[in-house]
Amino acid sequence: MQSKELDKIYTPQEYFLLEEAGEVRHEFINGNLIEMSGASREHHFICQNILLALLSSTKHLGFKVFMENMKVKIPNENQYYYPDIFITKEAETDENKYVQFEPELIVEVLSETTRTKDMVDKFIQYRKLKTLNYYLLVEPEKDLVLCNFKDQQGEWNMASYTKRDEIITLPNLNISLPMEDIYKK
């Protein structure tokens, strides 16, 4: 594994080489590498449940589902993030082998160390993605999903889900996610 200089500003090309060769993932913010921390057991199970639900519900819709190891590029910014889960219909090209540009749904599972960054900083950046219709924030320790969605006028709104018998509907994608599927043990 190559060593990284913490005070160095990296180019996107250097970043991609380090990520490809490294064991630790980093998000890339304007030349700075931000190391990704490990996830809790609950975080892992929630991601796994959402992945399975999305794979099942999008099977015939033409979406590709990515979990944790695929980057998303923010347009017109020198920023790359690793969402916990996202879906896209983006065609496969050489340019998007390691990074995607057109997610339609992004899911972040919150933790004590990522909550503010996911709810504020990443949401500000993710909203720059013209293809993004939904941004879900999932609490792993209690039944709570915040569904940020773009309305017909392109304005962002939010709905919250707190009961296991509720179903998160994503009509622009023709997808429904039952809360009980997200939180099943």
Image: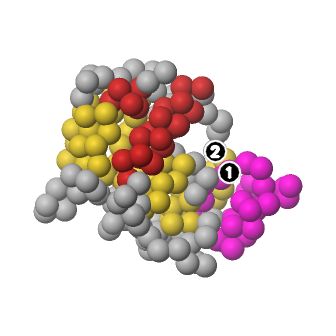
Examine the rendered structure and indicate whether residue 119 appears above or below residue 99.
above
Q: Residues within 10 Å of mark 1 (few under 14, many from 20)?
A: many
Tag 1, which secondary structure?
A: loop
Residue at image mark 2: 36
Judged from this view, the residue extending furthest toward the bottom is 94
Magenta region, residue range: 1-30
Name the residue: 42% across, 26% down.
183
Residue at image mark 1: 25
Name the residue: 24% across, 29% down.
166
Name the residue: 69% across, 73% down.
13
Q: Position of residue 173 (x, y in %)?
A: 28, 56
Decide: marks 2, 1 in contact (CB < 8 A)?
Answer: yes
Tag 2, which secondary structure?
A: loop
Q: Position of residue 114 (x, y in %)?
A: 51, 37
Q: Nearer the viewer, residue 105 or 130?
A: 105
Examine the rendered structure and indicate whether residue 102 appears above or below residue 114.
below
Q: Position of residue 28 (x, y in %)?
A: 60, 59
Q: Position of residue 80 (x, y in %)?
A: 55, 61
Indicate which disc, 2 or 1, sits on the residue closer to the N terminus. 1
Please name the amino acid that badge 1 sits on: Arg
Seen in the image, is 181 located left or right of residue 43? left
Seen in the image, is 117 located left or right of residue 163? right
Judged from this view, the residue extending furthest toward the left is 153
Please name the amino acid that badge 2 sits on: Met
Q: Which mark is residue 102?
A: none
Seen in the image, is 94 located left or right of residue 91? right
Q: Is residue 39 magenta?
A: no
- Residue 121 shows up from this direction: no
Examine the rendered structure and indicate whether residue 65 appears above or below residue 177.
below
Name the residue: 25% across, 53% down.
174
Examine the rendered structure and indicate whether residue 4 appears above or below residue 51.
below
Place residue 142 in its image quadrant.
Answer: top left
